[in-house]
Image: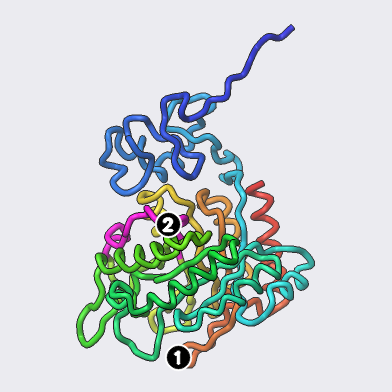
Amino acid sequence: MDTTTTTTRYCSTIGGILAEDGNTCCANSCGTCGGYGCDTRPGGKSSCCISEIISNNISCDTNDPPCLKSTTSSSTGSVQREVEVGIFTGSTSPKQREDDFGMEVWSYRLIFMSIFDLQFYKIEDVFNDGYTPILNMEFLSSSSTPVLQKIIDGIYDDELWKFATECTDYGKTFWIRTLHEYNGDWYPWGILYWYEGKQSNTMDQYKQALNKIIGIFKTKGAPVKFQLDINNVNGLDDTTPLSYFWPGDENIDAVTITAYNRAYSTPNHQYSWSFYKHFQPAYDAISKLTSKPIWVAETATTSYGTDKSTWIRECFRSIALDFPRITQVTWFLYNKDEEGMLLDWDLNTDEQKQAFKDGFLELKELTS
């Protein structure tokens, strides 16, 4: 009779510290697993930084920390996890797209609303359609003046308190993303935004504004979760490390990274890159700063100078194999005109729709 027993090796029982991703086990000497300054803690980068531990791919089954509870497959490099998919389609119903595919695809629907036009029935409509809303709440108006100090000074308090109350009364959990792509120069809350000949926002203002917004919802007891969204590259071709733009993650629930392939659509984008090339530098930087879940806030590609069907398939595969901390990706499938140029983000041909379906199914297979 075999009397051998198997003891589960939990991170805590083998002398480690488990990161919030539920998989990475840092050495106990680190004090905290991952996050900003992980490479300066006792044990160094290899023991305390999540991205480094993931890269080393050492299993906790037979090794002490630093290690991973679930390691990547030696044949495919995938990590077993659930990766959910969301969509932005403008006014088109996501269900119409699922009808095109002949299967259910979406878990989330991304919608945009201005702080001056927060219509809660739109949140209810998304829930009624069977999806979880991701609300991108924008502080945009006809004025181009910077908004961070206005948020701090309470200019938008009435709108925020009213909406937070509606969220609390409704009682269902959904996601809010606000002050998004804040390392850019294109929105009036951006750190690199220029107004009247000078840079007009600071990181300190950004932290105060973001925490004020979140604080209002928390005070009301609203069951919402908050995303911190950063663009994969800074505005103005600024080369400042993303760590400079890091506000901390104390009050957020996930970090999202926006990454588009604008292939040959503007004078500044006379190239076509893979999703991996766009996403990898920002992913590596953010992985060192936080142990929060990492999502793809928005992604898509134009078709200019690009085999769009191949790009889509490779994007899904890269998410599965190259970025094991990604647990959600939202596709921006909506054509739009920008400065006289059609950005054909949508799935505009049967071939592109088939590529998306194939890529989605491979993503599920690789991560199952």
Residue 206 sits in quarter: bottom left
Label 2 is placed on what type of residue? Ile
Q: CA distance from mark 1 to mark 2?
A: 34 Å
Q: Quadrant of the N terminus?
A: top right
Q: Which residues are magenta?
A: 240-257
Residue 19 sits in quarter: top left
- Mark 1 or mark 2: whose residue is earlier in sequence: 2
Picture residue at 31% right of the left edge, 43% below the top: 38
Q: Is residue 6 left or right of residue 46?
A: right
4 or 366: which is nearer to us? 4
Label 2: few (<14), some or many (≥20) within 10 Å?
some
Q: Estimate the x, y position of residue 200 in percent, counting from the top left.
A: 24, 78
Q: Estimate the x, y position of residue 139 in percent, counting from the top left.
A: 40, 79
Residue 244 inside the magenta-drawn segment? yes
Residue 252: which disc? Answer: 2
Label 1: few (<14), some or many (≥20) within 10 Å?
few
Q: Residue furthest top?
A: 1
Q: Is residue 278 visible?
A: no
- Where does label 1 land, which residue? 339
